[in-house]
Image (spheres, grey):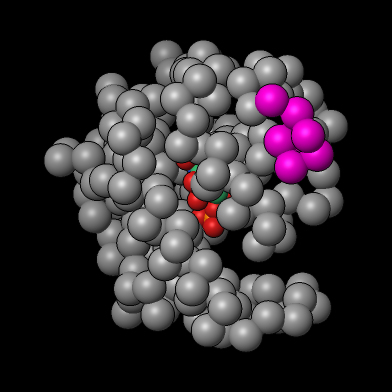
Amino acid sequence: MSFTVAIDGPAASGKGTISRALAAHFGMLHLDTGLLYRAVGARVEAGEAPEAAARSLTQADLAREDLRSQAAASAASRVAAIPEVRAALLDFQRAFARAPEGAVLDGRDICTVICPGAEVKLYVTASPEVRADRRHAELVARGVDVTREEVLEDVLARDARDMGRADAPLVAAPDALVLDTSEMGIDEAVAAAIAEVVRVRGG
Ligand code: CDP
């Protein structure tokens, strides 16, 4: 029997950290679906057609070192607005969600489009300022030379593109539990997510 935890939310809301912690806690598999869009974006930047790139992603594409950059995030959010790209990535994500050990998927449209039947649905968010602070600290720790203002600008531009697109816009599913992590430490946010899984699944 599969068990799916679907997690959506905007950039740097903490959904990736929460997803990894949930998967580790319950022994489930984790898919960061943003990586799929980042990998497609990187290949499109190198000159490929978006749909062809999305249809032929390999493990090596997903393992690229440069996918965590701001440029890759921005390229991802541009290709993510193309319906054919989203359609090409759909079956892989749905199949992953049915892993027998259970699966945690995080992204922008997991609760609304990819796994509307997921047993647990979370929408993880935080104010743009808090998200920009977090992403800025993360980038600086990795040695990236970027100002907080530049990061905030990028976060706001991506929010607008992700929430404003016609196909699978970022929105909280009506039946998702909203976790606003603006004032929460990561431990508290992870504990709240674990509590929700335990409530639905039992112990
Ligand atoms: O970690 P962060 O939230 O900054 O980025 P990400 O989750 O890796 O997503 C990068 C971009 O991919 C987003 O800005 C979205 O445009 C797109 N994306 C999407 O459209 N649908 C998903 N399920 C996941 C990501």
The residue under the point 59% across, 45% down is: 76
Give the x, y percent position of residue 147: 62, 85
Give the x, y percent position of residue 8: 38, 46
Q: Quadrant of the N terminus?
A: top left
Q: For residue 60, what is the image quadrant?
A: top right
Q: Is residue 180 above or below residue 22?
A: below
The answer to whether residue 138 is visible is yes
25, 85: nearer the viewer = 85
* Residue extent of the magenta highlight: 43-49
168, 33: nearer the viewer = 168
Give the x, y percent position of residue 154: 52, 67
135, 120: nearer the viewer = 135
**64 lies left or right of 56:** right
The answer to whether residue 198 is visible is no
Give the x, y percent position of residue 89: 55, 22
158, 135: nearer the viewer = 158
